[in-house]
Image: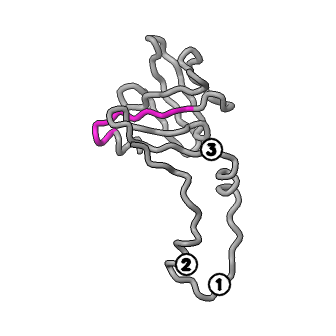
Amino acid sequence: MHEWMSDNSNTPHIVVDASFDGVSVPTEHIKDGKIILNISDTAAHNLKLTNDFVSFRARFSGVPFDVWVPMSSVLGIYARETGQGMIFSHDSDNEESLDAPAPATASTDTRPDDIESTRARSHLRVIK
């Protein structure tokens, strides 16, 4: 998403739940337990996006700060210009279903339409 937004001249922002363990952000910019971070190439220096964390160095009110955010604390990503992006669900039911694979069921007749009907509904929502 970050790359796509950047390629389309949009400014990617992430919404972070600052109450998660390991989140290192300037506390004076946290509002209602959340912080919105500009992760564009011009604002986030030495940006590292991995499956486990987001880290970069940025200036907040002119003061440099090393940001470190576990990926589990990221609530969503969106483009500032359009407001379009993705919100990630963090409810315990969805986390359990991601951690534990569903039990396999034996079937002798597996057709593509059967597979589609057994898939769980996605936890992702389109934001416009």
Q: Which mark is residue 33?
A: none
Q: Secondary structure at mark 1?
A: loop
Instruction: Look at the picture and state if 84 lies above or below 59.
Output: below
Amino acid at circle 3 = His
Extent of the magenta region: 6-16
Q: Are marks 3 and 2 in contact (CB under 8 Å)?
A: no
Q: Identify the residue position indicated by label 3 in the image.
A: 90
Q: With 7 as the anchor, is 71 left or right in this view?
A: right
Q: Identify the residue position indicated by label 1 in the image.
A: 107
Percent x, y of residue 37: 47, 28
Badge 1 local density, few (<14 within 10 Å), some, or many (20+)?
few
Residue drawn at x 56%, y 60% is 121
Q: Which mark is residue 114?
A: 2
Residue drawn at x 59%, y 87% is 109
Q: Are marks 1 and 2 in contact (CB under 8 Å)?
A: yes
Residue drawn at x 56%, y 21% is 31
Label 3 and label 1: CA atoms lie apart by 32 Å
Q: With 104 as the anchor, is 86 left or right in this view?
A: left
* Mark sitting earlier along the chain (1/2): 1
